[in-house]
Image: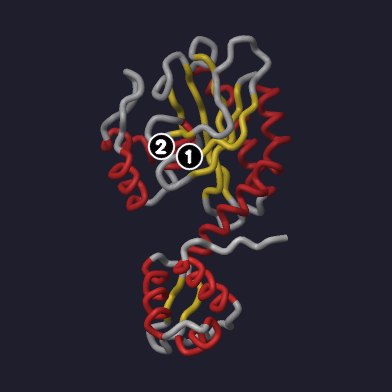
């Protein structure tokens, strides 16, 4: 099989450097060793390493000046792992939740500025809320987004507000940061978030988060239905079903509370 070489040489060199550091021990790898193995001159290697450090793919020990893999690799690795395993683990539980509620059930993964819906099951009732795998959910106006946002630290939340803003999608969408921030402690306390026609008119939603084995938010699940049927009383009735489903998925991912 023909192996296609990267078109951008600097990316290939950066990849080679990461490979060398990944094969090193806990002490890290020196600049000299990196140059010897990759056959790069010191200036080129140093410049690439400096960029990789800024991007957090590489860390440099302040004392030894040796290089080790950075936390960015772990973050991306966890995201890939979640995308590979979560849908298969969650699907039977999503089916059960869909059967209990007879409404649309969705599974989403948090990204930096929004969430990606990776699975969606439609309920058996004729009039259904729509949700599609591959669609995106904003943080400020969806139950999925608010459930995750409530678990984010302040710096991450402010970065989302700064980069995405709070666009108004319906007359009910919250567009004030302080108003949304005041809601988050209540979401954390009750264990779920609500979307009352804030993302789409005529549609209400409840969502909660899923934790992984590290105790971090790995995903979120939601139940969505038309507002004339999926009203406040119905949502409260099924809140425990949604939380129970999320807890079962979290447990399957190794979470222990």
Which residue, given by chain and number where applicable, does mark 1 sit on? 115
Q: Nearer the viewer, mark 1 or mark 2?
A: 1
Can you say whether 9 is above or below 43 in the image?
A: above
Residue 122 coordinates in the image, percent (x, y): 64, 22
Q: Quadrant of the N terminus?
A: bottom right
Does residue 239 lie above or below 48 as drawn?
above
Question: What is the x, y in percent for residue 170?
Answer: 35, 20
Q: Secondary structure at mark 1?
A: strand
- Please tell me the numbered disc located at residue 179: none
Q: Residue at 54% x, 78% y: name it.
A: 21
Mark 1: give few (<14), some (14-19) or many (20+) Cα within 10 Å: many
Picture coordinates of residue 208 (x, y %)?
A: 53, 37
Q: Residue furthest front?
A: 2
CA–CA distance in space, label 1 to label 2: 7 Å
The crowd level at tag 2 (other Cα within 10 Å; few <14, some 14-19, many 20+) is: many
Residue at screen point 60% across, 78% down = 23
Q: Considering only order in the chain, which callout, 2 or 1, is on the residue closer to the N terminus?
A: 1
* Depicted 152 relative to depicted 40: above or below: above
Work out whether residue 23 or residue 46 is closer to the camera in this orientation and state it: 46
State the scheme by which the image is colored: secondary structure
Nearest the viewer among 113 and 251 is 113
Number of marks drawn: 2
> What residue appears at the point 48 percent right and 87 percent down from the top-left corner?
30
Asked if the residue under mark 2 is in contact with the one under mark 1, i.e. CB atoms within 8 Å, the reply is: yes
Residue position for label 2? 139
Q: Position of residue 12 (x, y in %)?
A: 51, 68
Q: Secondary structure at mark 2?
A: loop
Q: Is residue 234 left or right of residue 65?
A: right
């Amino acid at each position: 099989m023909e192996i296609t070489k990267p078109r951008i040489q600097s990316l290939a060199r950066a990849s080679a450097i990461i490979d060398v550091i990944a094969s090193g021990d806990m002490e890290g790898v020196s600049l000299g060793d990196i140059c010897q193995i990759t056959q790069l001159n010191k200036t080129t290697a140093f410049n690439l390493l400096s960029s990789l450090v800024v991007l957090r793919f590489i860390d440099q020990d302040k004392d030894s000046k040796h290089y080790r893999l950075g936390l960015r690799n772990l973050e991306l690795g966890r995201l890939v792992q979640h995308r590979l395993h979560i849908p298969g683990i969650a699907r039977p539980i999503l089916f059960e939740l869909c059967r209990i509620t007879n409404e649309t059930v969705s599974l989403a993964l948090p990204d930096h500025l929004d969430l990606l819906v990776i699975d969606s099951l439609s309920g058996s009732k004729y009039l259904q809320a729509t949700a599609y795998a591959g669609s995106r959910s904003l943080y400020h106006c969806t139950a999925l987004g608010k459930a995750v946002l409530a678990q984010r630290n302040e710096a991450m939340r402010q970065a989302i507000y700064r980069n995405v803003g709070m666009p108004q999608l319906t007359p009910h969408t919250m567009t004030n940061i302080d108003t949304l921030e005041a809601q988050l402690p209540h979401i954390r306390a009750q264990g779920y978030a609500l979307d009352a026609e804030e993302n789409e008119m005529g549609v209400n939603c409840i969502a909660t988060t899923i934790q992984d084995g590290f105790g971090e938010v790995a995903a979120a699940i939601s139940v969505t239905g038309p507002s004339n049927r999926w009203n406040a009383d119905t949502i409260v009735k099924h809140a425990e079903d949604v939380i129970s489903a999320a807890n079962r998925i979290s447990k399957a991912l190794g979470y222990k509370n």
